[in-house]
Amino acid sequence: MMRSNVVDVVDGAAELVRLVSRARRVVSFTGAGLSTESGVPDFRSPGSPWLKNKPIPFDAFVASAEARREAWRRKFAMDDEFAGAEPGRGHRALAGLVQAGLSPAIITQNIDGLHQASGVADEQVVELHGNGSYARCIRCWHRHELAPIRRAFEQEGRLPVCEACGGDVKSATISFGQAMPQEDLRRAAALAQDCDLFLAIGSSLVVFPAASLPVLARRSGATLVIINREPTDMDAEADLVVRGEIGDALAPLHEFVPVARKSGVEA
Ligand code: NAD
C-alpha cells in the first residue's frame, strides 16, 4: 500500500525546515489562505464577504457606468474592512527565505500587497491577479493612486477617467473575464520550472492558469509541497501535503532561515 503524503503541521513544519535546508532555490506560490491570519478573509471558505455579491465581470465594467460605480463602491467598502492588515507569520517566513537569498521571488494570487509589506521588494513579487492598493487605466495601463479617486467618487460622485488617454480607470486587480498579465505568467512559469522546492500555500488551487504552476514545477523536477487547511485536487501530485494552519507550519522556518546558508540565487 502507498504511504500517505499527508502530514499534520507539527511533522510538516519539521519536514519543511529539512527540505529548505537542502534546497538550492525555493519558490513559493501563495493564495488567499496565507492572509487569513492577517484578518483578510479568503475567497471560497464559508461566509466569504467576497461572495456576498455576484462578482462584476470585466466586460460589464467596461460596458456600463452603473457597473463601474458599483465596483468602486464595493472596492472602497472592502478596503475599509481590511485596512490595517499586517503580514502574518507565513508572510514573514517567506520574506525570510527571499532575504536569505534562498528564494528568487514569490508568486502570488493575492492582491493585498502583504508580501511587499513583509519586506519583499516589488520586483520579487509576481502578482498574477494584480494588486488592489492602486488602480490602472484599462486602455493605456497608466497607474493611478486610490486616494484622489476615492475623494472625487465620494464627494462628487465622479468615476475615474485616465487623464492620459480618457480610458476608464479600474482597481489594478484582474477581474473575472479580464486578460491575465502575460509577462507575469511567463515569469511565474519560468520560476516554477527552475526551482528545486516549490511551496503551494493557502490556495484551493482551482483558479487556472495559476493553479497549473505546482504541477509544472513538480514535472520540471522540483519537490512539491502543498500547505493548506483543506484538501485540494492537486494533493495527489505533491511530494508532501501539510494539512493545517499555515502560520503554524511556516513559523519554524522563520527561526531557521537567518542561519541558513546563502545560496546566491538570482531573481
Ligand atoms: P481560496 O479562497 O480559493 O482558497 C484558500 C484556501 O486556503 C482554502 O482552501 C482554505 O481552506 C485555505 N486556508 C484559509 N486560511 C487558512 C489558514 N490560516 N491555514 C491554512 N489554510 C487556510 O483562495 P485562492 O486559491 O487564492 O483563490 C482566490 C482568488 O481570490 C485569488 O485569485 C485571489 O486573487 C483572490 N483573493 C485574494 C485575497 C487576498 O489578496 N488576500 C483574498 C480573497 C480573494
Image (cartoon, grey):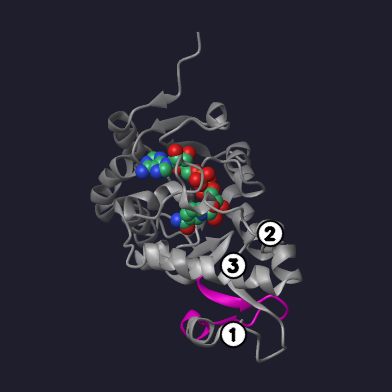
Residue in the picture at 64% in, 71% down: 68
Magenta span: 132-149
Tell whether 55 sits left or right of 103: right
- How far apart marks 1 and 2 lie (CA) works out to 21 Å
Left or right? Give the position of 39 relative to 111: left
| Residue 24 seen by the camera | no
N-term-proximal mark, 2 vs 3: 2
Q: Neighbour class for label 1 at 10 Å: few (<14), some, many (≥20)?
A: few
Dot 3, how many residues are within 10 Å of its Cα: few (below 14), some (14-19), or many (20+)?
some
Ligand 1: does it lie within 8 Å of the C-beta at label 3? no
Q: CA distance from mark 1 to mark 3?
A: 13 Å
Q: In this view of the protein, which residue sits in the foreground, 90 or 14?
A: 90
What's the residue type where badge 3 is placed? Ala
Say if 52 sits above or below 140 in the image: above
| Residue 198 drawn above or below residue 74 | above
Indicate yes or no: mark 2 CB to ligand 1 under 8 Å: no
Q: Which residue is mark 2?
A: 57
The quarter of the picture where residue 19 lies is: top left
Q: Secondary structure at mark 2?
A: loop
Q: Amino acid at mark 1?
A: Arg
Label pair 1/3, CB-CB below 8 angstroms = no
Near-viewer residue (56 or 195) = 56
Location of mark 3 (residue): 71
Number of the label disc, if any, that sits on residue 158: 1
The residue most toward the bottom is 163
Residue 251 in the image: x percent, y percent?
A: 27, 46
